[in-house]
Amino acid sequence: MSMNSTPASERVHIGIFGIRNAGKSSLMNAIINQNLSVVSEQKGTTTDPVRKAMELLPLGPVVFVDTPGLDDEGKLGQLRTKKSQDIFRQADMVLLVFDGTGSLTKTEHMFLEAVQKKKLPLVIAVNKCELLDEEAKKRWREKFSDKLLLFVSAETGQGVQELKECLASLKPEEEQRHLAADLFKEGEFAVLVIPIDSAAPKGRLILPQQQTIRDILEAGAIPVMTRETELRQTLSKLSEKPKLVITDSQAFQTVAKDTPEDIYLTSFSILMARYKGDLEWQTEGARTLEQLEDGDKILIAEGCTHHRQCEDIGTVKIPKWIESYTGKKLDYVFTSGGQFPDDLTEYSLVVHCGGCTLNEKEMKYRIHKAQEQGVPITNYGVLISYINGILERSLEVFSVLD
């Protein structure tokens, strides 16, 4: 995916599900017109989810995800089906593929019930339609008279275009969400503080910075970018006072000192907590720092995987800041990417990144899991602002929406 394309976390996720050898991978290849997923007569060929981003008009940017069979067996099979369950958790829409020459299994019935319970948009594709006579098609229609059902052939391409058009006509339910646009009126200034250090990717901005700039422009406001070392100079040269200063959380302390009290201040990570998570709950999570004891276990979780540097924020800086603030000796566990424990009860606190690479469903699932198990959870920006004594200030800007 190019730097200028819609990030996967902001695309509509269309999960392709079905039992082994229903033809999921073949159908995925036919939809995207590429041989991306491995296809074989042997059951269980797809062992890991396979993703492909594309434009599906008029729906817009989507990502198709081909998944392992729902009925996979054995110890390895259980791991594969767990990956399918993870994708189902993130899915905005479901494409359920049946082998038209077979009959419905208990696994497929149970999956249908799960889709209905979540009220996800559903399209059923009956594959291998070139092998079906009219009587067989009639039986399928009778079974699913109340659902969107199409007959397709991944082998011949029959019905694939109609399937794409059908998927493109659906739109998942979503509430209106803003990263920063609702904080500004047209023509107001926003100053974005972007440190350029060893952790900054060469030649580009990180995803939360890109998304925030785009959102501010959407509001008709004016984003101004600067490093923390030039913030004072930038503020003094603006023709009018900016509405808000948004900083990388790692520079919070310095930026807070250089930002006048009559200018709102927050961070990219806090904006992400509001956009994809539960800011109120994550704020309460940060306050539990006061209750930590020696030996407590802290989970530090990141949504992406990246090369760790000597001053990595997750594995180095945050543990150092927590221990400096609390004066406690704590035990840390680190996870990244798709890894997130099912059982959180051994942890006294979960500290999560902003989740810019995770879609909203996945981020809210992780927060809900912590809530369900009674484990406090916060995010990088909220935690850092609390440690620096500026949490209340970093949340003030959201009061303008009340």
Image (cartoon, rainbow, N blue to C red):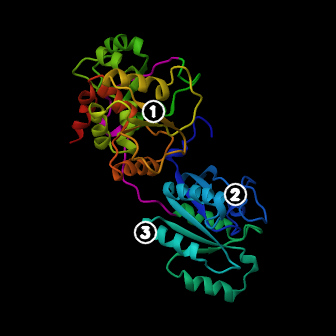
Q: Of the residues tagged 3 and 1, which is closer to the observer?
A: 1
Q: CA distance from mark 3 to mark 1?
A: 37 Å
> Magenta segment, principal secondary structure?
loop
What amino acid does circle 1 point to?
Answer: Tyr
Q: Which residues are magenta?
A: 170-197
Q: In the figure, residue 237 lies in which quadrant?
A: top left
Q: Is residue 274 magenta?
A: no
Check the picture and name the quadrant holding the C terminus: top left
Q: CA distance from mark 2 to mark 3?
A: 26 Å
The picture places residue 293, in percent across and down from the top left corner, at 32, 32
How many marks do you count on the picture? 3
The tag on residue 332 is: 1
Residue that badge 3 annotates: 117
Q: Nearer the viewer, residue 213 or 193?
A: 193
Q: Is residue 220 above or below residue 116?
A: above
Q: Is residue 224 left or right of residue 309?
A: left
Camera sees residue 220: no
Circle 3: is it few (<14), some (14-19), or many (20+) Cα within 10 Å? few
Q: CA distance from mark 1 to mark 2?
A: 34 Å
Which numbered disc, 2 or 3, marks the residue that appears first in the sequence? 2
* Residue contact at pointers 2 and 3, CB within 8 angstroms: no
The picture places residue 31, in percent across and down from the top left corner, at 67, 60
Q: Secondary structure at mark 1?
A: strand
Residue located at (24% from left, 27% from top):
393
Q: Is residue 151 left or right of residue 40?
A: left
Q: Is residue 182 magenta?
A: yes
- Residue found at the very far front of the displayed protein: 295
Q: Secondary structure at mark 2?
A: loop
- Residue found at the very far bottom of the displayed protein: 135
